[in-house]
Image: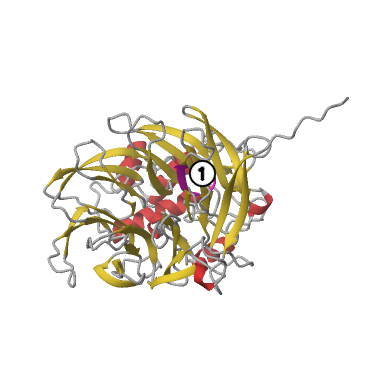
Amino acid sequence: MANSNDARPATTRAWRLPVAAAMLVLLVLAGALAARLASRPRSARQPAGQTKTAKRGAAPTLAAASGEASKAEVDRFCGDCHASPPPESLPRSEWRQRVLNGHIFLKEYKRTLSPPPASTEQLVRYYEARSPAETPLLKVTNAPGPPPIRFAKSGYPAPNQRFPRVTNVNLVQLFHPTRPDLLVCDARYHQVVAMRPYMPPGKNRARVLAKIPGPAHTVVADLNKDGIKDVLVADLGDVYPSDHQQGRVIWLKGRAGGTFTPVTLLKNVGRVTDVEAADFDGDGDLDLMVAIFGWRHLGSVTYLENRTTNWSRPVFVPHVIDDRHGAIHVPVTDLNGDGRPDFIALFAQEYETINAFLNEGNGRFRKETIHDAKDPSFGSSGIQLADMDGDGDQDVLYTNGDVFDFAFLRPDNGIQWLENKGTFPYTYHLLTRFYGAHRAQAIDMDGDGDKDVVAVAFLPEPFFPQRVDLGLDAAIWLEQTTPGKFVRRSLDTVSCDHPTCIAGDLNGDGRPDLIAGNFWFGAPDPLDTVTVWINQGPRVKPAKVSRR
């Protein structure tokens, strides 16, 4: 019983692609997923396995059959690798394949249970007797009327590149002294691009910094401390899910003329999804923390200790901090205020957990659990660190909406706030359910002094045609109206092509905007590289007209 972005007729979450992140999301498995979809009759209006009337967790109509496995046997079978998935998390029709996959993985990983596990049929009966016949559709209520802020939607296309597969967008200050640049990772065109919105439209607005096979994330840092900004890139290598060893960490070494020279700092590892820079060992230089998502067998969180003495030949020594695959993000912060950089890691695949790694010095990190979803198919897609409640510490904004393992809409997708109260685990708050939630950003959109949330969805039309008829939200704004209370507002519907987003002041007017990366996945129409919602400020209330 194993585990964002997968397509499979006979696998489980192990086919996940990192999104995000995830991400995350180099889902170039259209053939396999299309074959699976073709084997299931479904319409655009009502996909198989879903109903508008079924209630999640409702008493099943199928009576428990004789000879079914016990709860203890289920836990022993599933729990050998991960938490036992709750029966109500999937429709009844899914469970036979999930159990078969579990047996496949036991053999593949050469794991032996003693005594032997319950039979496939007994395990299937347990789950089928307790799962709903169909998956319910969400009943989400957005605030009525237009948002109190006006947004102008537009797109930024890269020249002659209308079929993008953007995995990450990042607002940074790279070329202009006061205005931000937008770094875009595009896995279809194998490049990291700096989009410069302050430039007039044309070829000079989009500047290719480097050609990289599978860029998944960027961060700006002066790695060699020469006074010139560099760019660190997490490279998936080959975007297809496999245990290849083509992942890399690339240092785009900045030059005085504004050019960049790619230098490989780590290679021959699984798919790399994130890299972050900090002085972890306190010796005055920047080390790196790397999320290696991998696939089934390869993957880890690895600390690259900077031992460089000659920057013409940089030396980074790898130390594995956690040997689990499925790491998506590893943002850095000082959690306990001791002056040493800690980091937080999101693990997907069958783990679906968020861990804090507290820096104890000398390359040692103490692991604590911030949150455990307790569902190996939860579909974690990303995290952001933010002080959501204004109490001075870092909370975690967490999305789950990676549904490519199933090709149907999951009602447990959504956005969560994990509140830091100074102890582990953090306190869980569900902010909203949101189909295909792939990335969320905490930011004060309306200038009232508290953190709001903007988020985007990724549900490509070829696999989720119902997004049109159901009018699914593609981008939303959760306005924090009172402390801890959020009102949901729809910013856009149907065009759920966004695996990644960033929020910030793109056009220099002092107001935060929303920028989403687009991932073309075989839809009939081309896409802009990014979609932008420009914040135009509060709506002007119409003046009252005198009746006299």
Q: Nearer the viewer, residue 187 or 240?
A: 187
Determine crowd level at label 1: few under 14, some 14-19, many 20+ residues with C-alpha closer than 10 A: many
Query: Residues in magenta?
Result: 435-442
Look at the image and say whether residue 101 sits in the magenta stretch. no
Which kind of residue does numbered mark 1 sit on?
A: Val
Q: In the depicted view, which residue is nearer to us: 527 or 93?
A: 527
Q: Position of residue 214 (x, y in %)?
A: 39, 68
Residue 185 place in picture, x, y as percent: 43, 64
Q: Residue under label 1, please give it.
A: 454
Question: Residue 114: x, y in percent?
Answer: 23, 47
How did the renderer colour the structure?
Answer: secondary structure
Is residue 68 in view?
A: no
Is 330 situated left or right of 414 in this image?
Answer: left
Secondary structure beneath dot 1 equals strand
436 lies above or below 146: below
- Residue 404 placed where, x, y %? 48, 56
Image quarter for residue 420? top left
Q: Is residue 441 highlighted in magenta?
A: yes
Dominant SS in magenta = strand
Q: Toward the viewer: 456 or 84?
A: 456
User: Among all residues in the image, which is located at the extreme right?
Assistant: 548
Q: Is residue 38 left or right of residue 68?
A: right
Q: Note whether residue 235 is visible.
A: yes
Quick check: 218 left or right of 155?
A: left
